[in-house]
Amino acid sequence: MKINGVQKQCPGNLTVSEMLQQEGYASEGVAVELNMEIVPKAAYDTTVLKEEDVIEVVRFMGGG
Amino acid sequence: MEQDVFMLGGQEFSSRFILGSGKYNVELIQAAVKQAGAEIITLAVRRANSAGEGNILDYIPQEVTLLPNTSGARNAQEAVRIARLSRELGCGNFVKVEIMRDSKYLLPDNAETVSATEILAKEGFVVLPYMYPDLNTARDLVNAGAAAVMPLAAPIGSNKGLATREFIQILIDEIDLPIIVDAGIGRPSQACEVMEMGAAAVMANTAIATAGNIPQMALAFKKAIEAGRAAYLSGLGRVREKGGEASSPLTGFLRD
């Protein structure tokens, strides 16, 4: 799977929650997109990732 | 006097200074928001780092409305994608649509901006589109459901001031939405001038971020914007094209 542009190994049955924890992302203050679709927070524990998935984890930063 | 407020997405704002948060650090952002008296602050949406960095939201007071931008978007589709992600971040439904194809002058793509505005307004966003000041586009943005129109004064980050003055005036005169002048305003005097012209608000980032003393410049902008607004509400005195007119009574005692 690809997380924020970086290719990563995808162990079986990895949920979005576990991925965030494993990769060191805060679970607060981020939004997750899976294959161009937003994953609602309520679905983090039940959404299982696959090898071919493309994941974006975003947050707010300073900007004009 | 009645309180002087303007409306965006059904929300009332009394500060007419929208502050950008790019290019300076969180402690200075916190100080600048305070000095600016800003009620709206812009943010960008970017890939998170996995190295547990601090959250910018911890440095912005709760009551300040967040205005995420879609910077980085090169077309309507990308802007819509960023806007949806920003809403998912859970800080309201305001969005500043910003779409650029050109990386040298960073000029907005007006046609794509209209498309994105239409899609996002239908999805319930309060859409503030950043645009090149063109009357026809501004009318299209009104029809697309924009909450305000944000014409540029000069290229983003240039601090060059009111290069598009005449065209911004046309928008102020003809468009029945708040006109918020965004980009290029480099000095408090320019912010003041655009408020004298009747703009609803001014957005500034680089002018503050590149100043010698950031919080103090935020305060200077606040005062200039308030001065310009008061001047607009007062109605500027007339200009006499030729000759002068004494300010003091001439009926004198020196020559009868």
Image: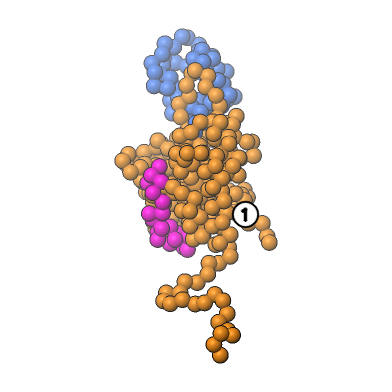
Chain colours: A blue, B orange
Residue at image coords 47%, 16%: A49
**Front residue of this view, candidates B105 and A28:** B105
Does the rendering let one see residue B95?
A: no
Residue B157 percent coordinates (x, y): 40, 42
Please tell me whether mark 1 sits on a helix, a strand or a loop.
Answer: loop
Q: Name the side, left or right, on which B161 lies relative to B12.
A: left
Q: Which residue is mark 1?
A: B5
Which amino acid type corresponds to the residue marked 1 in the rendered image? Val
B189, above or below B123, in the image: below
Residue B75 percent coordinates (x, y): 37, 40
B201, above or below B25, in the image: below
**Front residue of this view, candidates B154 and A22:** B154
- Is residue B164 on the magenta stretch? yes
Magenta region: which residues? B155-174
**Front residue of this view, candidates B182 and B193:** B193
For the N terminus of chain B, give its image quadrant. bottom right
Residue at image coords 48%, 53%: B189
Residue A17 percent coordinates (x, y): 55, 17
Q: Quadrant of residue B229?
A: bottom right
Residue at image coords 40%, 61%: B166
- Is residue B41 on the magenta stretch? no
Q: Badge 1 sits on which subunit?
A: B
Q: Name the side, left or right, on which B157 lies relative to B102.
A: right
